[in-house]
Amino acid sequence: MELEAIHQRVIGLDVHQGQITAYAILTEADGTLRTEHREFKTFKRDRRALGQWAASLKPDEVVMESTGIYWRSPYAALEGQGIIAKVVNARHVKKVPGRKTDVSDAQWLAILARAGLLNGSFVPPAHMRELRLVARQRQQFVGQLSAEKNRLHKVLTDGGIRLSVVVSDLHGQSARAMIKALIKQSSPSEVLSYASGRLKAAREELFEAIQGELSASHLFVLEQLLSHIEQLEARIGDFDARLLAGLTDQAPILALLQTLPGIDRIGAAMLLVEIGEDMNAFGSADRLASWVGICPGNNESAGKRMSTKIRKGNPYVRRLLCEFAHAARMTQCAFRDKFQSLMPWRGFKRAIIAIAHKLLRTVFAMIKRREPYNDRSVDYLVLAAKRGAPRWAKALKRIGKKIVTA
């Protein structure tokens, strides 16, 4: 049985690193069917030629597989010609095995597109795609920073320094100043002079913690690690500034997202450049969760429920959501209550994924309705009163008013 044609003029593109294979199926005005096959390199002039050729055919649909990052430049070339291509998931267009060539892949894409069987993946506007580069590179730097901090801790421990035992944050202002003094081989009294009075540890504990056997190799590695850590922190600060500067027009949505427990300004910005501000592109919270890969799998056969393992989706959004879930579970909110109810029988990791899923669905509703988050388990009037009471009491005392407690 032939597939019924929904679109009359379609182009399928099989995109690789060095070559783009294009196959067009065109229905002419007199009803005749014509096919056209072209191959293009992936250099700038060739991508421009691809866009011009595609525009000359006036297609109803142009589809391509989301092959790594190779689809992005051809997509931009088509976008420059006013053609918004559909980027489809490769697992949705798998061919019957036996005949596998670039031409047949492009032809199969065109056949499926002509029958209207393909749905395009979400592709944000060009401005958001550029900011994605900034946000994703920032995530890479944050990962490197965490690795370097862990390595610094290991080298200190190897040298007998137990500062992390008595200091909660090894990279706080006081602890870092003390580490720098240790690298300079300062005397114990001079090292302790950098300890802030806000540290809970006693001076005797701090003195014992900085006693170690740092060799010349230890000192060299520590100096290089600390220098790299400070460089990474400076670069992350530059990326933060660039990301926020690019989202000045989306400031109201950023403020909206920050009302959700666990999300700060940078987290809101990094999430926004990934999912965009138009939730109509996804249609529903279920589709958004499926696109991210944060919802349970759907695998049932003969009435038996198979594995519900989450599938691959957008790893950058999933990582952000898990970070938000970790932060939200430590606040007074409904997400904390949900986590505590799930953790005993589902385990820590699955509970975090469930909270991340719930957070994403909440984000979808907030952006779609342009409404802030309102936690059902928190009395905001009481919370505001508790936070403001000390300040109000001091103000009343300054003006000579007496405070009467019940």
Image (spheres, grey):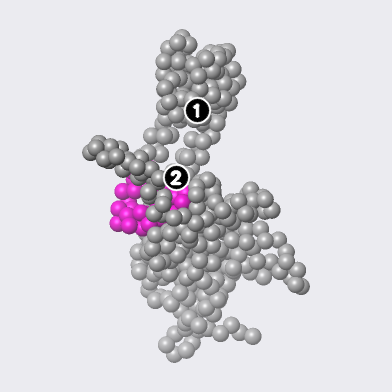
- Count the marks: 2
What secondary structure is found at the residue carrying circle 1? loop
The kind of residue on which mark 2 rests is Gln
**Which of the two labelled residues, at mark 2 and mark 1, occupies the earlier sequence position?**
2
The kind of residue on which mark 1 rests is Leu
Span of residues in magenta: 239-268
| 344 left or right, relative to 67 | right
Residue 272, given in percent of the width and then of the height, sits at 41, 56
Whether 160 is drawn above or below 237: the answer is above
Whether 104 is drawn above or below 116: the answer is above
The foreground one among 265 and 224 is: 265
Residue 137 numbered mark, or none:
2
User: In the rendered image, is residue 404 in sight?
Assistant: yes
Residue 55, given in percent of the width and then of the height, sits at 38, 71
Q: Quadrant of the N terminus?
A: bottom right
| 125 left or right, relative to 313 | left
